[in-house]
Amino acid sequence: MWTSTLLRRLFGGIVCTMIGGTLAGQTPSTLEERIRRVVDAMPPAVIVKGEPAATAKLAGRMAALHVPGVGIAVIHEGRIEWARGFGVTRIGGPPVTPDTLFQAASISKPVAAMAVLHLVQAGKLSLDTDVNEYLKSWKVPANSFTERRKVTIRELLTHTAGMTVHGFAGYAAGAPVPALIEVLNGEKPANSPPIRVDIEPGTLWRYSGGGYVVVQQLLLDVTGEPFPKLMHDTVLAPIGMTRSTYQQPLPQDRMAEVATPYRADGEPVPGGPHVYPEMAPAGLWTTPSDLARYAIEVQKSLAGTSNKVLSAAMVRQMLAPGLNHQGLGPALGGSAEHPYFDHGGANEGYRCNLIAFEHGDGLVVMTNSDSGGQLAAEIERSVAREYGWPDFQPVERTIATVDPQTLESYVGAYQSPRGLFTVTREGDRLFVQLSGQPKFPAFPESAREFFLKAVDAQFTFQVDAQGKATGLTLRQNGMVVPANRVEGAEAQRMEANAASLARRFQEQKPAPGSEAAMRRLIEELREGRPDYSQLFPEFAAVIRQGLPEAQASAKQLGAVLSVTFKRVESSGGDVYEVKFQNGTLECHIALTPDGKIAGMGFRPSQP
């Protein structure tokens, strides 16, 4: 896949099973009460002080988000306190149990990194040696970037090697699966572009699944062992991850253990699980309990009470934060008093999260749906509240009283890079609406600061010396979006554009010129000469940075054979099915009101 800036089935009642026992001193009834609070009283993202919090049940959220099944493992005081399955492995199928297999997706990376560090610890690898000294079957191609600085294992593990290719789509059932060298070179039947260095190594953090494919090849060349066997012998078996494997595809005799993958709309992924020859970045099959065992081994090794794979000194290196708080495999977060390591995963039809504090607690959530990421975040919030974690809990806010004249002064239109914010007033309440999105009530924490209840998002209004609003700033999940107030004819024009977008979505009619613009940019990318004057500046900057990768992808796809309109998204983007000489993809494209391309991206075509 290449660059992108865009972003009712019924099933039986929730079925639960349990493994393991209880901690010493914890009675079964107490544990059951704790689990019931987690799954039957899931808190909202925002709690208003003095108001009763509206909680949700896991069963209801699974139904609303079309997540057939979920597996949960909770770590408390360094042990798996409980592990359960909820829902079903497939619509109409058996229940999820603690032994149900899910694809770990990108959580494969920190587990694979442990094998690399084991070889470093044994003196067979060095973190800071040129990787081409270890690679035999394939070499990192030399260019002006690698001439300045060589790629090292440390940089590959921390996403700072300047490597291309963010992630992988896998290969649907029946599709030809490339050899690893073909993935590295972007050669047929690989569906991803060549893995190359296009930024000077060590200078920038940029997530790269491609870098972990290089790691996989390096391990093969150094050890001479098949990757699944190496991982089993070095990491999985010593830790006790007995149900886990990097085998791709999964052996047929284990398919009955698998949770079938589903799309966000509740439809199954055609053909079932995709195959990922990119095993190190995406190929691990596992259970929540097995991933919890990985996390516990890291915790124990750090404490010096276990060294089944790594020593305490090596784990300290693994968890030392680099650029973008990245460790040697896992991502890092928390405070100095309560640091944690974590990683998420997203394969076709699977979403999962792992969080573990360095001292004691943790959580693994695995789902068989593309919408499972949202559910996992809600489960994290519920577990964090129940166990008193310092992070991931609901945000508590207080509603202030604001003069109606002040509220009225904020009413208007605000233009941002993400679209038009429209602020309206109904009685003593402000409402905020982003182009193509629902209207949300905004609640004041002070005269200038407001928050939403539906999601953890805050707005701050900027005012001039006369108290007139000149702009607003949205803050959400670490993202900061500024918006300038527009008035008069300009505001009327923008509001008309927003209304037009809403009509297009309701009528499901593509924007005039979107198909032509899409065809033009595809051809320009194939030639390596995009017309940046026809791109929105923010999108133009993305294309400039990723042009080599985008051009390689466009060339690999070949000429456009046909284009079929599919739908208008609520954001205003148009979706087309594009048949190329060498495959069929879904194209998502959004235009600015003056016809420039604000964003365009591709993903595997959906049924």
Image: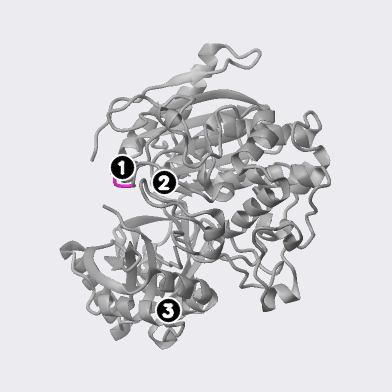
**Cα–Cα span, label 3 and label 2:** 28 Å
Point out the frontmost of discs 1 and 2: 2
Q: Is residue 554 above or below residue 446?
A: below
Which element is circle 1 on? loop
Which element is circle 3 on? helix
Residue 46 in percent (x, y) is at 46, 45
Q: Which residue is mark 3?
A: 525
Which element is circle 2 on? loop
Residue under the point 51% across and 38% down:
380
Residue under the point 81% across and 32% down:
304
Q: State if disc 2 and disc 1 touch (CB < 8 Å).
A: no
Q: Which residue is mark 2?
A: 274
> Magenta segment: does it hold 19?
no
Q: Which residue is mark 1?
A: 268
**Cα–Cα span, label 1 and label 2:** 12 Å
Q: Is residue 597 above or below residue 30?
A: below
Front residue (pair 584, 432): 584
| In the displayed structure image, the side of residue 50 where residue 393 appears, left or right | right
Q: Which residues are magenta?
A: 264-268
The image quadrant where one finds the N terminus is: bottom left
The reply to whether residue 599 is in sight is: yes
- For residue 362, which quarter of the picture? top right
Q: State if disc 1 and disc 3 touch (CB < 8 Å).
A: no
Residue 216 in percent (x, y) is at 63, 51
Residue under the point 31% across and 40% down:
64
Callout 2: few (<14), some (14-19), or many (20+) C-alpha neighbours within 10 Å? Answer: many
Q: Amino acid at mark 3?
A: Leu
Residue 552 in percent (x, y) is at 48, 72
Main SS type for the magenta part? loop
